[in-house]
Image (cartoon, coloured by chain):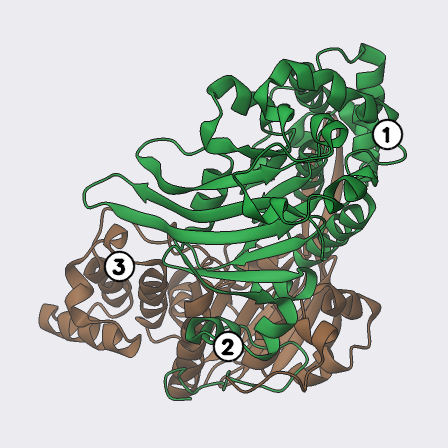
């Protein structure tokens, strides 16, 4: 039962050009909330500030202004409070080829968050949890001893998801979790995320530039443009009846064979 | 039905490692003038290997074990004789009377570009057998002939093209390289003029010629690469994932640009990507590849409405529709269950 809320979030970066310096407002007065059991998609072009929001939510960056609230209370910036926050808010990164350490086996990747966040667990408990986690993401527990290079892209991303689930978080931030994967396994990974979300009652922030999966995968869509949220609403509403000009531009730019052939012509596969 | 510009017959490529990998197996297709042929498939299915094989850019351990790629090019010799000298290729022999008339259309030279319309005949004597006939089997060309024919007959936008520009050489010098190699008689002024024209054609300001690659955005670099591929106005362009690293809005701009230029200049495009919705929207025909084989080749509309092969259907189902009903994608239910 976790609720993450941001209000008036602003992040500015200083850009230097010789002796002059200018300020770039990457995130400008953004407010939204992530509720348990719901998926919110954050869509926008590259450079619109999507990933900056992810970094702010993970406390990898300090916001210039605005506040982040966890269950109604401002989040802790240090100490035990921060540790608790880190346990509750987890991340799945875009590139499963870069986010796993090639020196360590799968079990190590899952054991570390377990040991860090649950120091009282015994070795046998941890082994049992690792097996359980691998089963949760539909991987053979026998893969625990393998290293990342022995796994396919889809298997690696499943390991990354299992790692994010290890400390039993309440919020999951997924930054383009399937864009590096082969097309035929993307839906499988997204469906897995959706299943886990329902079972664990997670709040998911799904960051993507793919409007089609954003529509089908999430409850609400936030459209970001130049650091601002220009449209916010239920997924179908935002995609089918876009209000803002920029949302329309994005929807028109997305490849859509139905524009050419019509929707009715497609036979059920 | 348009004249074919490229015929690929029983093309197979193996990677001679242990065990041998059959990357491309017995692929045959024809590419017609002005056509956009989409090549769809997942990573590792042999799309790029096929493209490299056609252009003869494969390096060991890859080897073309069978088949050939024959280019049917309109040339001065074919025009004057009126008859295609080659008897090797059935498709082009069938309509010999048609080919000269279609050649007379400005297929090689656009109305605006005067230097290039002069250039091909002046360059052709140097490249021997390449331009002596209308049809050329690239398997029989020597290294020098291949070097002369590449980019002139067929050009390529490589995968991750925007990172394939040389970072320490200005855009202008990289552009001029093409003309220095392939059109050595072109004057300096002409060359500069032409480089600027090409950049403007893809929507990049000509002052950018002075820039270095790091000063341009990803989309701009991609446009520069496409302009370079068009520099000699080849009848065929191969684009290997030309928009994969770009975001949707820039991707849309570039696709519009490719379609517009295709209409204007009449070149044929082989567009390689895994993004099936994108192909369905812009290509005329689509070939679906799997494990090195073309499992289905058909009209874009046919592939979309009545896919015949099981794999095509699976690939189509992997892309949830933007505006349509939820289709195969049922949130929360696993794909196998539906």
Chain A drawing hue: brown
Instruction: Tell which tag, 2 or 3, sits nearer the viewer.
Output: 2
Quarter in which the N terminus of chain B is drawn? bottom right
Q: Quadrant of residue A198?
A: bottom left
Residue B301 vs residue A72, the one in the foreground: B301
Q: Quadrant of residue B300?
A: bottom right
Query: Residue B234 placed where, x, y %?
Result: 69, 35
Measure the C-alpha gap from mark 1 to mark 2: 45 Å
Looking at the picture, does residue B112 appear above or below residue B94?
Answer: above
The residue identified by callout 3 is A109
Residue A64 vs residue B53, the one in the foreground: B53
Measure the C-alpha gap from mark 2 to mark 3: 33 Å
Looking at the picture, does residue A70 appear above or below residue B336?
Answer: above
Which residue is at 73% across, 72% downward? A260
The residue identified by callout 2 is B317
Instruction: Tell which tag, 1 or 3, sits nearer the viewer.
Output: 1
Which residue is at 49% across, 79% downward? A203
Query: Residue B329 placed where, x, y %?
Result: 51, 83
Sort mark 1 into few (<14), some (14-19) or many (20+) by Cα contacts within 10 Å: few
Measure the C-alpha gap from mark 1 to mark 3: 60 Å
Query: Residue B276 placed where, x, y %?
Result: 57, 65
Q: Which mark is residue B113?
A: 1
Left or right, A139 with respect to A68, comes to left
Chain B drawing hue: green
């Amino acid at each position: 039962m976790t609720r993450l809320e941001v209000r008036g979030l602003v992040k500015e970066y200083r850009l230097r050009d010789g002796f002059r310096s200018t300020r770039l407002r990457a995130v400008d007065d953004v407010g939204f909330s992530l509720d348990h059991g719901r998926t919110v998609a954050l869509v926008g072009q590259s450079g619109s500030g999507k990933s900056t929001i992810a970094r702010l939510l993970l406390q990898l960056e300090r916001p210039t202004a605005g506040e982040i609230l966890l269950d109604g209370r401002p989040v802790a910036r240090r100490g035990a409070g921060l540790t608790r926050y880190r346990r509750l808010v987890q991340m799945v990164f875009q590139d499963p080829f870069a986010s796993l350490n090639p020196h360590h086996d799968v079990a190590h990747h899952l054991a570390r968050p377990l040991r860090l966040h649950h120091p009282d667990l015994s070795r046998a408990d941890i082994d049992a949890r690792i097996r359980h986690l691998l089963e949760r993401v539909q991987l053979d527990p026998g893969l625990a001893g393998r290293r990342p290079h022995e796994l396919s892209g889809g298997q690696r991303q499943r390991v990354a998801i299992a790692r994010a689930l290890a400390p039993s978080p309440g919020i999951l931030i997924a930054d383009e979790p399937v864009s590096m994967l082969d097309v035929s396994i993307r839906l499988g990974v997204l469906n897995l995320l959706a299943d886990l979300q329902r079972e664990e009652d997670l709040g998911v922030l799904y960051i993507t530039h793919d409007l089609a999966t954003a529509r089908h995968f999430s409850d609400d869509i936030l459209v970001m443009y130049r650091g601002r949220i220009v449209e916010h609403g239920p997924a179908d509403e935002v995609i089918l009846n876009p209000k803002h000009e920029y949302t329309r531009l994005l929807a028109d730019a997305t490849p859509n064979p139905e524009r050419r052939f019509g929707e009715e012509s497609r036979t059920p596969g | 039905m348009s004249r074919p510009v490229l015929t690929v017959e029983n093309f197979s490529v193996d990677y001679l490692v242990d065990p041998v990998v059959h990357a491309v197996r017995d692929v045959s297709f024809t590419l017609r003038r002005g056509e956009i042929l989409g090549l769809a498939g997942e990573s590792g299915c042999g799309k790029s290997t096929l493209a490299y094989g056609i252009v003869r850019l494969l390096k060991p351990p890859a080897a073309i074990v069978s088949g050939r790629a024959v280019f049917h090019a309109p040339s001065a010799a074919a025009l004057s004789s009126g008859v295609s000298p080659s008897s090797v290729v059935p498709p082009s022999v069938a309509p010999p009377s048609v080919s000269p008339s279609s050649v007379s259309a400005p297929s090689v030279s656009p109305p605006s570009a005067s230097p290039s319309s002069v250039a091909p005949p002046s360059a052709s004597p140097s490249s021997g057998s390449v331009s002596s006939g209308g049809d050329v089997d690239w398997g029989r060309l020597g290294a020098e002939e291949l070097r002369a024919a590449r980019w002139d007959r067929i050009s390529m936008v490589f995968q991750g093209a925007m990172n394939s520009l040389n970072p320490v050489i200005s855009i202008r010098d990289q552009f001029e390289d093409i003309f220095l190699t392939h059109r050595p008689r072109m004057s300096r002024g002409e060359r500069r003029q032409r480089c600027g024209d090409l950049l403007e054609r893809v929507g990049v300001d000509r002052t950018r010629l002075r820039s270095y690659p790091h000063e341009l955005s990803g989309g701009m670099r991609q446009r520069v690469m496409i302009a370079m591929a068009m520099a000699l106005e080849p009848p065929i362009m191969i684009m290997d994932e030309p928009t994969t690293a770009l975001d949707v809005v820039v991707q849309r701009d570039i696709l519009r640009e490719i379609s517009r230029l295709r209409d204007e200049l009449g070149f044929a495009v082989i567009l390689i990507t895994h993004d099936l919705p994108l192909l369905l929207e812009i290509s005329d025909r689509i070939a679906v590849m799997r494990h090195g084989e073309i499992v289905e080749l058909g009209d874009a509309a046919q592939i979309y409405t009545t896919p015949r092969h099981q794999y095509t259907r699976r690939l189509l189902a992997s892309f949830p529709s933007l505006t349509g009903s939820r289709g195969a994608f049922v949130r929360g239910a696993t794909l196998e269950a539906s």
